[in-house]
Amino acid sequence: MRIFGNKATVMPLAVAAALSLGMPQASAQGLFDMLFGGGVRHNPQGEFPPPPKPKPNKVPGGGGSKISSPSYYTYKADRLVRVDFAALTSSPAPAAATEPEKPQDAAFVPSVTGNAFHEAIAGLGDYELYAEPYIAKALIAYYSANPDFIWVTDTAPNSRAEDAVRVLGEAASYGLTPADYTVDVPAASSPASANERLKELVRFEMALSARVLRYAHDAQSGRVEPNRMTGYYDFPAKPLDMEGVLKTLAHTQEVRTYLESRHPQNPEYQALRVELEALQASEENEIVVDPKLLLKPGESSPELPKLLTLIARNLDDEMGGDYGDVLARLGKSELYDPELVPVIKAVQKRAGMKGDGVIGPRTVASLAGTSKADKVTKVKVALEELHWLPSDLGSPRVFINQPAFTASYIDNGEEKLKTRVVVGKVTNQTAFFYDQIEQVDFHPYWGVPQSIIVNEMLPRLRNDPGYLDRAGYEVTDSSGRRVPSSAVNWGAYGANIPYSVRQQPSEANALGELKILFPNKHAIYMHDTPQKSFFERDMRALSHGCVRLQDPRGMAAAVLGTSVDYVAEKLKHGHSTEKVTRTIPVYVAYFTAWPDLAGKVEYFDDVYDRDTRLMQALDATEAVRSPAS
């Protein structure tokens, strides 16, 4: 796995709309590093953690084992710990600027408030401040090496503190929860004694540093650790040098610029922020229909009259002439009468869907749209998920959005190709991760995954061991030698089969005429398919997990930087492989709210119910943080 460069462009929300319209990004991370120094440790060649070993499950009733799919976990957020200030309160007074003493930072030069800080830390003895363990550790390490105020000058919070508090207070504009970063700010003047005032200020100092570090972490990496949620999520860590953040903030007056630069800086993130702001200022839909409604002819639902009202309100002359009378008579009916079926079919076909007459989530969405509450949730989820990806998504890139069932090739801010895709079934979900495209295989072999061999082929092989030979598959043993399928005693094996199976190139090959590889532990790639009819369906979660392309030749030409004619010529010459020589990140992504390149946010069904699980993880994080002082 390669982690692509983290280019950043900082700008206020007021100009975010311009970003969402495709304004070219400035390559600014180097500028930030020059201005602000540390804070982020880049790891451009980071690797994913090793894949978990498959878990064999016994099949009830005897007859071998089964390889299970990844599972979802009950999310456990980091527990807060009380910050132990003992190391600070027992430290000696700061030495002269020319004679720094350990454990102080060798570069530390105490300011005029240095002695005041040393006097003030005595007031931390009984202070109960709770923070994440890594933040608590960073606080003590930083202030042990740099015993001075960041946020206080003389006897009051300084302008640096004012800027930080304002940024924390605007957290909601990023889809964050402001309460997670709340700090009580001391009044400008206090009738308390000098000692009490110092105690008040040093506690404010520590609280603000703790919450600023939490904010910086959340802005860079998100509030939730995605890999703890499910085995379907696979993201490298984004290390953050907590002490470096505080050191940077102690030496700059550009606090707002620095903190805002920790957020993703791509146009998609800015467009989602603009959408969130617009949604929060808008009114709720007048008619709200259950987005998960499923209604077949002959069934009843109180949601049906709402849909019929929306249909009647938007009738054109043609539909009004055909169905106006039916809607007038049955518009209040909760029973899905057979007379209403042609109405629903006509509405579905007009929306570009298959007119099957079954009222489901896509029919509801086409008529009622998505409710404001659902849109807000989807946008907040998308903002959280974007923290898991590189700040600069890269160009060129391939972006697969599973809920939209689409894959796009984007170069220089233009969508050069967009094609329909088929993704994994709910029982064989496509993972959410990113990688780099490496090669295109023409007339490929299909190496059958062990899960398919065990779960789907093995039951048949026990009764018909030769069927792989007849169906055009090759079987090889652990030494790579070909053996006839009929010669293997398949009944002797469960989840651990010491044979590999691959399908030879042919018109019947499951991968069709080509595949596009980005090697990953999930064995997911893009490929052609002989099952072309699947692309005509609205709901295309139908595969074993890989991504099937409606236009595989177009995508292969795009990533190879060549033409469709070139790809067609390559296909005339049998099996071959061609390396992709450019750096092209590929995002196998999952966003139920996503902006197009013009900044218009589109909404999609939560096919795998992952938004719900992410909201549960965010709730678990809030529950841990809420008692924090």
Image (cartoon, rainbow, N blue to C red):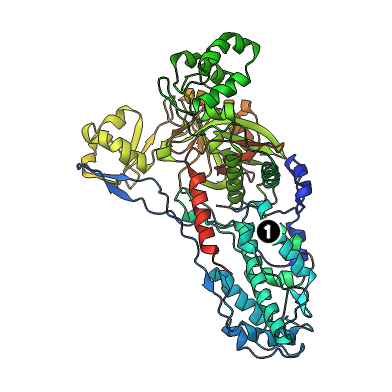
Where the C terminus falls, by quadrant? bottom right
Give the amino acid type for the residue marked by disc 1 in the picture: Arg
Say which element carries label 1.
Answer: loop
Q: Is residue 103 something that shows in the picture?
A: no
* Residue at the image point whose x is 76% and y is 64% from the top: 163
Q: Please report the residue visible at 79 percent of the width from the left and 68 percent of the height from the top.
A: 253
The picture quadrant where one finds residue 122 is bottom right
From the viewer's perspective, is residue 228 above or below residue 553? Answer: below
Q: Residues within 10 Å of mark 1 (few under 14, many from 20)?
A: many
Residue drawn at x 75%, y 61% as measured from the top left: 256
Placement of 202 over or under 100, stated as above or below: above
Q: Is residue 498 visible?
A: yes
Q: Position of residue 281 (x, y in %)?
A: 70, 43
Judging depth in this view, the residue of 363 and 195 nearest the camera is 195
The one of 512 and 304 positioned closer to us in this rendering: 304
The vertical placement of 348 against 192, above or below, is above
Residue at image coords 64%, 44%: 582
Which corner quadrant of the image does residue 271 belong to?
top right
Of residues 422 and 481, which is closer to you in this image? 422
Q: Position of residue 519 (x, y in %)?
A: 50, 46
In the displayed structure, would residue 621 be above or below residue 144?
A: above
User: Among all residues in the image, which is located at the extreme top?
Assistant: 321
Q: Position of residue 91 (x, y in %)?
A: 63, 88
Instruction: Single out the residue that lies furthest toward the left.
Output: 62
Along the horizontal axis of the image, is 476 left or right of 300?
A: left
Q: Which residue is mark 1?
A: 262
Q: Is residue 149 left or right of residue 460?
A: right
Q: Nearer the viewer, residue 275 or 479?
A: 275
Count of marks placed on residues: 1
Position of 3 with respect to 606 (left or right) is right
